[in-house]
Image (cartoon, rainbow, N blue to C red):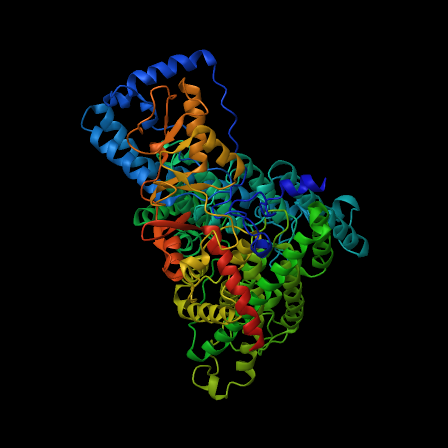
Amino acid sequence: MEEEDAAADPYLPYDGGGDTIPLKEIPRRVIESNHMAAPVKQTLPPLRLARRGNQSARSNYAMSNGGGAASSSTHLLDFLEEPIPGVGTYDDFHTIDWVREKCKDRERHRKINSKKKESAWEFTKSLYDAWSGWLVVTLTGLASGALAGLIDIAADWMNDLKEGVCLSAMWFNHEQCCWTSNETTFAERDKCPQWKSWAELILGQAEGPGSYIMNYFMYIYWALSFAFLAVCLVKVFAPYACGSGIPEIKTILSGFIIRGYLGKWTLMIKTITLVLAVASGLSLGKEGPLVHVACCCGNIFSYLFPKYSKNEAKKREVLSAASAAGVSVAFGAPIGGVLFSLEEVSYYFPLKTLWRSFFAALVAAFVLRSINPFGNSRLVLFYVEYHTPWYLFELIPFILLGVFGGLWGAFFIRANIAWCRRRKSTRFGKYPVLEVILVAAITAVVAFPNPYTRQNTSELIKELFTDCGPLESSQLCQYRSQMNGSKAFTDNPNRPAGPGVYSAMWQLCLALIFKIIMTIFTFGLKVPSGLFIPSMAIGAIAGRIVGIAVEQLAYYHHDWFLFKEWCEVGADCITPGLYAMVGAAACLGGVTRMTVSLVVIVFELTGGLEYIVPLMAAVMTSKWVGDAFGREGIYEAHIRLNGYPFLDAKEEFTHTTLAREVMRPRRSDPPLAVLTQDDLTVEELQGIINETSYNGFPVIVSKESQRLVGFALRRDITIAIENARRKQEGIMLNSRVYFTQHAPTLPADSPRPLKLRSILDMSPFTVTDHTPMEIVVDIFRKLGLRQCLVTHNGIVLGIITKKNILEHLEELKQRTEPLIDDI
């Protein structure tokens, strides 16, 4: 059972070689060779050709190659000059070759342009090709908006199902059930005869200890049921549907192949289990997983268009646009979604991808607005309108909230990574269902007594953001009136806090501690779990507490020099809801280290355009404070924890190593395995492939000269030999293999040679052995290389792969950490 769990667990590092060996294990698991390791060792079956064809093939070749008849060399395997099926594709858990993919796309584009004037049909095909990019992002936006609306409606209904049911219409949630009721009061607007709690249905009473215990029991029952169903569906049908998905999407957009991660089953199971996970009351959100859902839609629709289905680099342009659509529907922030895709997840973001991302976000937001899942005719649940400007002295508490956000982010990243690492290294991680049930049970038991933890996290954030007005009945707005002590609220902005506010402050402090602890243990469970909403909730709670404290300070000490100029008697001075909004942005920035996109998302989310300066100050402060403890955000930390081959463009390489110090082979390693351009036989080439696990081989002129000719991938060689064996007679074990344009001169009785020039990369990237690694790392980041050959005066010395660079960076980091600790 443990082996099955490990095989189905997408968060377990891939240990079959390739680019995903956990970085912590790299020093003791040094690659056996000097090349890229293959995830699965491919072997070539022995050639079994009918002997009756050998003589005829040998005689045919003698006629074409013997007796000086060199002009007929084009007869030899000319069909291999045409594209070979399967060549240029990638195995699972491999990195794509960005340069080759872009070259393929340019060649395809040139071919279409050259043919479009030949006929009306070719012109129509060229138009279809040109518009296919807009079509695929339109379909992605439509699907993302529709699924997001469905998830929002279903999650709200199932969340209220834990507390009761609407008798007049089962499909209505609590708020919708009481819309049409004429028997609600202002003080108890959420109570109506149509809505029945579980205690009323089962026991027939709405008040008393028995009813409280029954409601408590049913709350825990539904929470555990939803969590159990979610983790079972993920474990059985789609293991890749767990988690946030953003770390893997960042890795995929950088060029890594994870087959099935963006597939149909993952989309369907993630959509269903996301509703269940949110409704279970766990400390998680649906915003991060919505990005994964949108990218699944983009990946599925890209297969309808050959322009994207056959080119991995072009497909990633669609995924960048899809991630923008995902954030657009998650927060109702189309512009923020585009900036999020640009700043946070995308690896390659050309200008046309910017336009298409904008269009995809627009379409998705339009569809969500048409569905109107929140019933407020807006894209978001958190829309607020503040009627008071902010004052200069308030920058001090705003910056303090930024400091809190940075400290919280640094603490959360370290604590969550430590727990996830412990989960991987202990037997506890082998039982994901038990872990989810345990966390859900603790969350439900502790959350129910506190109204601020019992309610949906999105509803909590909405309440914390809201400014107190005459129509608000929240405890947070129960201020004392100077005119009449019994009045709950007065229009006089200078007002002392009442008992309800003080009670709410204590409950919010307990909710803050609860959210901090449970979020650490919840993020990383084997259910869909986002981090945006829990982080924003923590910041909003802290911000509201600070806002009320500053408000009361200004009321009781309005003669202080800080308040004297702005907070005159009768002047509306402090808005606690604004502090909650700033705190939410600061905490989310501290965890993710986003800056520009985060500020835009928050002001789109709340409509608070006037408060951009406080948001910018808090977000930048949180980033600076968080970076002081470590420059990695939570997503980069999880990428490194899972061993994904991701080169972060934000990291600076400040060391002075050279290419020869990083290249393989090293002094203690076996010599570099190479192929000669025309000296090998099929049997020798088959032996090299079967005995090694390298992903590619440098091709040289000869063993003596070691001059570089090109680079051939292992997968392409395997496919080309198998293809030739199926389609042509006469290929024998002793057939000569050549990578040159013309066949070498061979004896007349030699078997037919095998030409593999079409799979040879004639222009592999090379650096000299004295090239600084700073430049090599920049080349890998900006060009998306898989490997780079190291030469000296044109002679091949070794090879540097993406995996070698990650090993080197990890080794340098382990060297510098003890030095920092000593300092």
Tell me the quarter of the image containing the N terminus: top right
Farthest residue to the left: give it.
117
Disc tally is: 0
* Coordinates of residue 757 in the picture (x, y in percent): 34, 33
Instruction: Tell me: 56 left or right of 496.
Output: left
Within the image, what quadrant is residue 55 found in?
Answer: top left
Within the image, what quadrant is residue 659 found in?
Answer: bottom left
* Coordinates of residue 728 in the picture (x, y in percent): 40, 19
Observer able to see residue 347: yes
Observer able to see residue 172: no
Report the front residue among 403 and 392.
403
Report the front residue among 553 and 364.
364
Tell me the quarter of the image containing the C terminus: bottom right
Report the front residue among 254 and 367.
254
* Coordinates of residue 533 in the picture (x, y in percent): 55, 57
* Coordinates of residue 413 in the picture (x, y in percent): 57, 62
- The vertical placement of 122 against 633, above or below, is above
Farthest residue to the right: give it.
210
Within the image, what quadrant is residue 461 found in?
Answer: bottom right
- The vertical placement of 188 against 352, above or below, is below
Report the front residue among 430 and 723.
723
